[in-house]
Amino acid sequence: MTFPTYLQSLDLAAWPLDFSWEPIDANLIWTSNDEDDPRLAQAMQRIKPTPLYALGIASCEWVAARFESHTDVSDLRLRIEAAWAAVIDWRYARITDVAPLPEDVPRLTVRPAWFCSHVMSHAFLMFTGQEALNDAHALVRLCDHVLGRHPAFEPWLSQTLRRLATQFPQNDDGSAGRPIPRSFFDPAFVWDDARVEDELKRTIEALDPSRNPYLRAPAGMLDKGFTGTPYRYPA
């Protein structure tokens, strides 16, 4: 899975490593709450859980693109691919947590990329409930921490939050929200039902669980209650 065109055009990997990364930075991102950034929290509270989870994945793509020339992000990208499948049906994915890092890894590159995978694994387990907000909030804050000075990030985030709240408003009807295509997070995206269905179909049918350990095998999906034919859309 290649990076989206809008991210490729930004050349994020060339941006200076103009941030700090100490244990306290990770802790502050993970434990951030409404009081730390009330505007962000209020904007995210207006959005349903599944689209919030998708926002977290899109933020992970920014992080992966940011570090791709500094460290190996191939595992993170496989996790991202599986996470996009989970937006359509959670049974496609089996995103496990990452192993602890050795102490001597590069602090400004390997550690934030690892932290992204760690938070994303928790987000996968919890994305249909209240934790969807907390985990998506942490992933957005991580992206802001490592890329917040890039001139494209804040406009992208503001526009994306507005569009998500318009398309998927949190109305307390108990639903998590419908599947959302990856291309929704491209600033040039315009919603069209036929286009959305076509992209969801292409996303699912391009997957190969034999090449991605974070995708579930068809038999495993059926064991989890999946109905229809795995890796076909509609199933």
Image: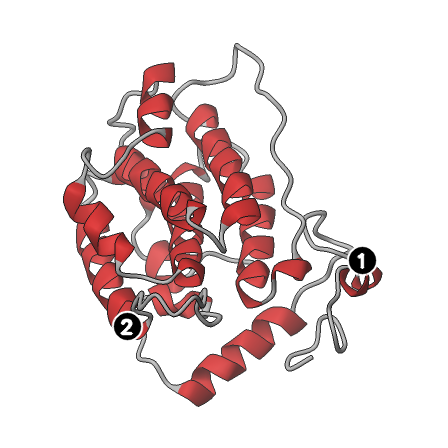
Q: Nearer the viewer, residue 129 or 160?
A: 129
**Can you name the residue that lies furthest to the right here?**
219
At label 2, counting other C-alpha atoms closer than 10 Å, the crowd grade (few under 14, some 14-19, many 20 or more) is few
Q: In which quarter of the image is the C terminus?
A: bottom right
Residue corresponding to mark 1: 220
The residue that appears at 34% across and 36% down in the rendered structure is 142
Q: What residue type is labelled 2?
A: Ala
Residue 218 coordinates in the image, percent (x, y): 80, 64
Q: Which of 191 and 166 is in front in this view?
A: 166
Label annotation for residue 193: none
**Can you name the residue that lies furthest to the front here?**
173
The residue that appears at 49% across and 52% down in the rendered structure is 127
Q: In this view, does 57 lie above or below 175?
A: above
Q: In this orientation, does residue 108 appear?
A: yes
Q: In this orientation, does residue 22 appear?
A: no
Based on the displayed image, in which of its 4 quarters is residue 100 positioned? Answer: top right
Label annotation for residue 188: 2
**Can you name the residue that lies furthest to the top here?**
103
Residue 198 coordinates in the image, percent (x, y): 52, 83
Sequence order check, earlier mark of 2 and 1? 2
Q: Is mark 1 on a helix, strand or loop?
A: helix
Residue 12 coordinates in the image, percent (x, y): 33, 44
Q: In which quarter of the image is the N terminus?
A: bottom right
